[in-house]
Amino acid sequence: MFNKSMLLLIAFLAICLLLFIACDVEDDNDDDDDDSQWSGPLEEGRYWLQVGEPQRAREAFKRALNEQPDNSDGHWGVMLSSGLHLWEFISAISTFLVDVDDGYQVEDIDPGRDLIRPIVELLAEGYFSAAGDDIREHSAWLQQNGEPGFQIDGVPVLLMYEQVAELGTEFDVAERTGSLVVGNLFDGLGGVLLSLDLEVNLGIVFALIDVDFGELETLELISLIVDALDRLLNDPGFPTALQIDPDYMERVALARLQLGLGMIEYKQTIEAIRGEVDPQEDDVLGYADLNANGVYDQGEPLVIPGIGELSPEQMDLALALETLLYDLGAALLDRTDLDINSDGDNSFRLSSLNPLLEYFNVPPLLLGLVKIDVAAFFEDLQPDTIRDFLQTLVNVLQPFLPDPPDVF
């Protein structure tokens, strides 16, 4: 008989499977109907982008590139539609999370967890990786061919099946780099999930989902998440939770690089926005040129679709994330061929968290001397590498945190 955890897991997996199927299904009428509706695949791709069908747009732009391999609009179209296709996953999962019911206990054990791996494999390899490869390939082409721009209006962004932003009009270097952030982070995260033993105590996971985070202070929330991770890693019923499958060591090594690049590229995106010298009114990602001098000046707010001009508090958050992600990305890439500072120590200093803590009105707690050599965990990959890294992070953070709320 199915328990409540089982039913919710099946619902989640069904969403994932439907998303994958939607990703993989071809439009059977492309060859017969498209010519009568559009002047060509580029026009068709633009149409599907503007009506919120990124996978159909992706297919159309790929057909356009088959006909015209050097058409920059085709490369932009595949890259943008791939990123928006990944965003659809966030929309579906957000819907699942906000609809979770109450009442999970730590003792809830799901007998159907063996269904997770094949679904994660479909998502990671058929969804995240395919889109990530498209984004990287076409971003590289655009970069190598003089950074041609792209113009389009009215591209919707959906969250929980409601439109939260509309993209347009000018796409250029900042938008290209931002697409890389999405592609690499999703692909890296998918690779990690694919490689891990996900046989964990789902009662802990569902109990965490059930928490009203809005009622918690920032440090309470951090402490709760750290406590949940500690419990998952040390649950005696699941001693191999979050171990790396020995068959996936190479995938973890690749995911490390993808995550590191995605984090570094966040800073590069912000820098690209600051480097804009053209009028900002029609930029997708831009800044408010308050003194109208045509260049970015310190203190001018960024402009983000769906939000508009960032408030001073939102700018503090954007800059805090820039610091945190750049430092963590540098730590992940340390002592690899992609090392951004081969002559220096790129260990992750926990003081990188301080700007984020300050944003939440929490006094800085972590000294710069407290650091983690992230690269060391990946230089000799073993099944417990990620478990050991997460446990080290838990052990370093817990002395600085208050007791967690009594949730479990």
Image (tube, grey):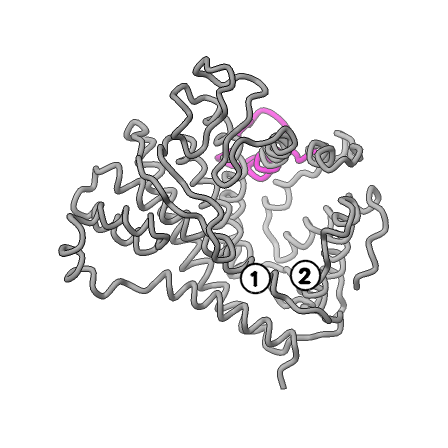
Query: Toward the viewer: 245 or 330?
Result: 330
- Residue 85 lies, in percent from the top left, at 40, 53
Residue 250 visible somewhere in the drawing: no
The numbered mark at residue 43 is none
- Residue 269 lies, in percent from the top left, at 48, 32
Q: Which residue is at a point 76% across and 44% down the rendered structure image?
A: 218
Could you tell me which quadrant the C terminus lies in?
bottom right
- For badge 2, the amino acid type reads Ile
Determine the secondary structure under disc 1: loop
What is the C-alpha distance between the residues marked 1 and 2?
26 Å
Determine the secondary structure under disc 2: helix
- For badge 1, the amino acid type reads Asp
Q: Which residue is at a point 69% across and 52% down the rendered structure image?
A: 388
User: In the picture shown, does residue 102 fall above or below 322?
Assistant: below
Which residue in the structure is indicated by mark 2?
Answer: 209
Query: Toward the viewer: 375 or 29?
Result: 29
Whichever of labels 1 and 2 marks the residue nearer the N terminus, that label is 2
- Residue 208 lies, in percent from the top left, at 71, 60
Q: Which residue is at a point 49% across and 19% down the rendered structure image?
A: 296
Which residues, given as a range, are shown in magenta? 327-349
Question: Can you tell which of label 1 and label 2 is closer to the viewer?
Answer: 2
- Residue 306 lies, in percent from the top left, at 50, 41
Q: Is residue 307 magenta?
A: no
User: In the picture shown, does residue 314 fall above or below 22?
Assistant: above
Which residue in the structure is indicated by mark 1?
Answer: 245
Query: Toward the viewer: 356 or 379?
Result: 356
Could you tell me which quadrant the N terminus lies in?
bottom right
The secondary structure that most of the magenta stretch takes on is loop
* Count of numbered badges drawn on the protein: 2
Q: Which residue is at a point 20% across and 49% down the rendered structure image?
A: 41
Residue 377 visible somewhere in the drawing: yes
User: In the picture shown, does residue 308 fall above or below 301?
Assistant: below
